Image: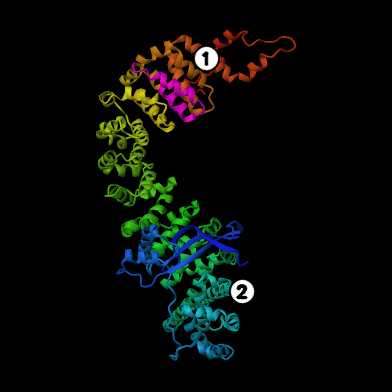
């Protein structure tokens, strides 16, 4: 770059998140760099994504989060004051996570067994010791680990290529034979892996492949130990069993330390997607699932976090489904501090239908419901898993035998409003008859809470509960007036109108509450309102049909208020909407069902004419509804009975009539020739009832 050129750097799209494995914040941003000439015109522009890690020390329950958030914002030049509240929220999450929600850094004494303290001045001597015997190699690796644990030494260590080559060579050649040596060497490289700028250095020396080989070897060796222990137990002698068991426990403890370091290094390196893909292709998922059988809490927590990270990809979830993942997660739900991370892993796995079935099969549902009581304000992941389990009809029935529904009722009535996850789960469970009956035990309080706050989402829960016939619907009888008042309230928003109308449409309404609150004139105004949303108009038509079917007085009131005209207008305007056409056809059927309203509608001929046209609709439900309504009309009117027979004849014999109407060679039969005689022949017509004809 010439001296008269300048570089302009701009930071855009700054986002904040927590570090997946350390008490630190990760700042991701996009850096735009432009080389400008003396006149300010850009000569070269480049943009790239960057990240910066803000590490936090001493974050505990006594920390003042507000002060710490302000300090972080002040020291990080990428953040401004508007990010202070977000930083404080992330700090609160990190403190809540603490050492129990994420894997901890592997412990180390920082000294060799002899108590010797390492020094950077003797670095060359430590490298030479790596070429000596096994004891000298372990001693040198311990001293080098002391140096690597200090972040200020890593730059100097990374510049010593002879040191890194020697460390990688010894780990490759002697790592399988000497567990303490392999642990120290892997820990040295783990210290580098904590900083993303050293990841290319680790890739150059193939540390990821080395660690994968070590983990695979140690897991095979552990399986061999267990086989030998089981064989010793089968011999039946108490002494050898106890001795072999103590030997096995000692070996397993040393091995688990090595597994922790190697997996933690792989977790850090897996921040780069290409490295993660290579690990998965090498069989990382089965290795992690095998680690779920171990006993050490820190190793289990690390394996859970790694599996949670991998489970965001469907290919990895499918592989976990082929392995006994859910079986091995079941015991961990009752162990603290493993339970929160286990629930988050199950949340990712529960998007798969087969894994949801496995969760139910292994009896994890009651344990997940118990997590709701223990999690307190952090119940979101458990609610997410339960919601996914409730998506299957077979899964819904299991909830009736837990205390999930009572917990949901208490959560929905709690101060501050219900959580969206709890409300979604409640609506899903209400589709089950038994669960809906459990919701009815707190129905009065739910209705009061929903209508007082105008909460349309809570009314949706009531609407779902009201779908079930029998005692569930009868439980709504004391609340009909309150629902009708909320429906016709002048300031009610459309979403509340939609849910209230849908709820009332499911119930057996009498004319009394509708007349008291002037619902029929209100329906006429709403159905004719051009601002009425399509879903709301659908619910209003359903309400009209339900009320007209249940009460003849409502049907007569609908005719007096002229509600047939807006129904016909909706039918003309939205002929392609099958749901609306079905509801309008049902409303016409309900109006024709009563003797007092049938005469005026048949005399006007408009409604039966539309029903006759809809008799050939593509929807089977629409055809059945229209056939039933026209059958009712035909019972009392011979002229419409004949038209109905003719329409059915033409529908059943449409192809024959089309061929017969075409001119041919001799003996052509016209479409109308003999039609009257044919229609009068009972053996050519359908003998079924009107409701069964298409």
**In this picture, residue 659 sits left or right of residue 421:** right
Relative to 616, residue 360 above or below: below
First reached walking from the N terminus: tag 2 or tag 1: 2
Which image quarter: residue 539?
A: top left
Q: Nearer the viewer, mark 2 or mark 1?
A: 2
Residue 579 in magenta stretch: yes
Which image quarter: residue 208?
A: bottom right
**In this picture, residue 608 sits left or right of residue 412:** right
Residue drawn at 58 percent across, 11 percent down: 678
Decide whether the magenta segment is chiefly helix, strand or loop.
helix
Q: What residue is pinned by disc 2?
A: 204
Report the front residue among 105 and 193. 193
Numbered badge on residue 205? none
Local crowd at mark 1 within 10 Å, few (<14), some, or many (≥20)?
some
Report the front residue among 339 and 533. 533
Relative to 680, residue 201 above or below: below
Residue drawn at 31 percent across, 25 percent down: 519
Local crowd at mark 2 within 10 Å, few (<14), some, or many (≥20)?
few
**In this picture, residue 478 sits left or right of residue 130:** left
Q: Position of residue 391 (x, y in %)?
A: 44, 47
Residue at the outermost right position: 665
SS for tag 1?
helix
Evaluate whether residue 552 shows in this view: yes
User: How many marks overall?
Assistant: 2
**In this picture, residue 402 sits left or right of residue 120:** left
Q: Which residues are magenta?
A: 560-587
Quarter of the picture holding the N terminus: bottom right
Report the front residue among 455 and 397. 455
Q: What residue is pinned by disc 1?
A: 645
């Amino acid at each position: 770059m010439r001296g008269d050129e300048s570089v302009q750097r701009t930071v855009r799209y700054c986002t904040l998140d927590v570090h997946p494995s350390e008490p630190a914040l990760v700042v991701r941003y996009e850096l735009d760099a432009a080389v400008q000439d003396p006149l300010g015109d850009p000569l070269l522009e480049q943009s790239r994504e960057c990240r910066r890690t803000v590490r936090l020390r001493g974050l505990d329950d006594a920390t003042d989060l507000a002060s710490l958030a302000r300090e972080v914002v002040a020291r990080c030049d990428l953040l401004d004051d508007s990010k202070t509240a977000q930083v404080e929220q992330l700090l609160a999450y990190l403190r809540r996570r603490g050492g129990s929600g994420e894997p901890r850094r592997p412990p180390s004494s920082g000294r060799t067994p002899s108590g010797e303290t390492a020094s950077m001045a003797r670095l060359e001597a430590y490298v030479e010791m790596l070429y000596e015997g096994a004891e000298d190699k372990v001693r040198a690796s311990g001293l080098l680990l002391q140096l690597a644990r200090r972040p200020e030494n890593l730059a100097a260590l990374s510049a010593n290529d002879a040191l890194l080559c020697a460390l990688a060579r010894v780990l490759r050649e002697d790592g399988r034979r000497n567990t303490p040596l392999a642990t120290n060497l892997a820990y040295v490289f783990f210290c580098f892996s904590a900083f993303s700028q050293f990841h290319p250095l680790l890739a150059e020396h193939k540390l990821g492949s080395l660690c994968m080989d070590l983990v695979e070897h140690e897991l095979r060796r552990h399986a061999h130990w267990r086989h030998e222990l089981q064989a010793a137990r089968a011999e039946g002698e108490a002494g050898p069993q106890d001795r072999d068991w103590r030997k096995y426990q000692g070996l397993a403890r040393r091995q688990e330390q090595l597994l922790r370091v190697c997996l933690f290094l792989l977790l850090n390196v897996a921040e780069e997607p290409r490295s993660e893909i290579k690990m998965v292709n090498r069989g990382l998922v089965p290795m992690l699932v095998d680690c779920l059988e171990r006993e050490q809490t820190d190793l289990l927590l690390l394996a859970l976090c790694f599996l949670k990270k991998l489970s965001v990809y469907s290919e990895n979830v499918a592989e976990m489904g082929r392995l006994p993942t859910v079986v091995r997660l079941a015991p961990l739900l009752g162990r603290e501090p493993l339970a929160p991370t286990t629930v988050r892993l199950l949340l990712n796995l529960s998007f798969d239908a087969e894994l949801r079935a496995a969760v139910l099969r292994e009896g994890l549902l009651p344990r997940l419901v118990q997590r709701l009581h223990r999690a307190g304000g952090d119940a979101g992941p458990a609610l997410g898993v339960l919601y996914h389990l409730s998506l299957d009809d077979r899964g819904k029935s299991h909830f009736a035998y837990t205390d999930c529904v009572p917990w949901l009722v208490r959560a929905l009535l709690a101060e501050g409003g219900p959580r969206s996850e709890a409300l979604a789960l409640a609506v899903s469970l209400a589709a089950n008859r038994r669960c809906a009956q459990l919701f009815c035990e707190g129905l009065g309080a739910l209705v009061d809470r929903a209508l007082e706050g105008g909460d349309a989402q809570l009314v949706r829960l009531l609407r779902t509960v009201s779908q079930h016939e029998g005692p569930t619907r009868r439980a709504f009888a004391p609340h009909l007036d309150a629902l009708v008042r909320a429906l016709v309230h002048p300031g009610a928003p459309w979403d509340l109108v939609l849910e209230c109308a849908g709820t009332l449409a499911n119930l057996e309404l009498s004319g009394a509450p509708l007349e008291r609150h002037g619902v029929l004139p209100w329906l006429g105004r709403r159905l004719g309102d051009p601002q009425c949303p399509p879903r709301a108009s659908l619910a209003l038509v359903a309400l009209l049909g339900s009320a007209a079917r249940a009460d003849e007085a409502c049907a007569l009131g609908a005719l007096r208020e002229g509600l047939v005209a807006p129904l016909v207008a909706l039918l003309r305007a939205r002929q392609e909407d099958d749901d609306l056409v079905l509801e309008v056809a049902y409303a016409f059927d309900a109006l024709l069902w009563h003797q007092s309203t049938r005469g005026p509608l048949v005399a006007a001929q408009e409604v039966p004419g539309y029903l006759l046209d809809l008799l050939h609709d593509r929807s089977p439900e629409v055809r059945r509804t229209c056939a039933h309504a026209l059958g009712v009309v035909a019972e009392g009117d011979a002229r419409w009975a004949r038209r109905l027979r003719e329409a059915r004849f033409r529908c059943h014999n449409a192809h024959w009539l089309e061929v017969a109407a075409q001119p041919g060679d001799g003996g052509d039969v016209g479409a109308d020739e003999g039609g009257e005689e044919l229609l009068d022949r009972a053996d050519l017509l359908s003998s079924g009832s009107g409701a069964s004809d298409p």
